[in-house]
Amino acid sequence: MPTAAQAQAYQCAVPQGPVSVPRVERDGPVRQTPIASYTLALSWSPEYCRTRQNSARDRQQCSGESGRFGFIVHGLWPEGQGRQWPQWCPTRRPLPPAEARRNLCMTPSARLLANEWAKHGTCMVASPEAYFQTTRILWNSLRWPDYDRLSRQDGLTAGDIRQAFVQANPGWRAQQVGLVVNERGWLQEMRLCYGRDFRPRNCDSRRFGPTDSTPAKIWRGI
């Protein structure tokens, strides 16, 4: 049976004590361009953590001490026209530790949360609280099929992964579900495409990724 998105954070436990939010360094130019659409980028955690179980930087997500994760939110990204998108808009509002803590079961990395607010959220809204509230609304609206069971299917394709999501989420179509499959053929990310009204819309070729007939594999973390 499909499960709510929050159930992707299996037995998630937020660490005791204060959450440290690292400083974010800008990695590209400031672009204050009009927003045409949005992407909700979801990382498949078992694949991400495949070689990071002992990484201090990824301890919250990958060590197992805070639970096991399926899909997690990489970020909510504003998109522009063509291949230009807004990023690194000026702000004096850093991510508060309390807001980071509130979202650790959705995005189990204070570093990633801080980066997504600074790089993407600043071009959407005035505060990190508003950015992550919007992200949580979209995240909690999703339902998930059993991708563990799907991963055992012979001849699995990108189209099978899309169709399983669409069947669990009425109102979505396969053309609105982008995927990233790495060079080894394993599912890395899902990228859900939204219009300016935050309703599902067809992905462009950049976000759609591999064709439906492309072979794909899902790493289960075992």
Image: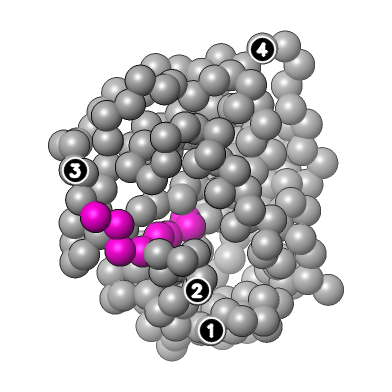
Q: Quadrant where the N terminus lies?
A: bottom right
- Name the residue located 21 percent from the left edge and 44 percent from the top edge: 32
Per the picture, the main secondary structure of the magenta-coloured stretch is strand
Q: In this view, does 86 lie to the left or right of 200?
A: left
Q: Which is more foreground, mark 1 or mark 3? A: 3
Mark 1 surroundings within 10 Å by alpha-carbon count, few (fewer than 14), some (14 through 19), many (20 or more): some
Residue 124 tag number: none
Label 2, residues with CA under 10 Å away: few <14, some 14-19, many ≥20:
many
**Magenta span covers which residues?**
34-41
> Which residue bears the numbered disc 3?
31
Instruction: Provide the residue designation for mark 2.
Output: 200
Amino acid type indicated by mark 2? Pro
2 or 4: mark nearer the eye: 2
- Distance, label 3 to label 4, CA atoms, is 33 Å
Residue under pointer 1: 173
Q: Which amino acid does label 4 sit on?
A: Pro
Q: Is mark 2 on a helix, strand or loop?
A: loop
Which label's residue is closer to the chain start, 3 or 2? Answer: 3
**Residue 146 lies in the magenta stretch:** no
Name the image colouring. one colour
Ranked by sequence position, the earlier of labels 3 and 4 is 4
Q: Residue 18 carries which label?
A: 4
- The CA distance from mark 2 to mark 1 is 8 Å
Marks 2 and 4 close (CB-CB < 8 Å):
no
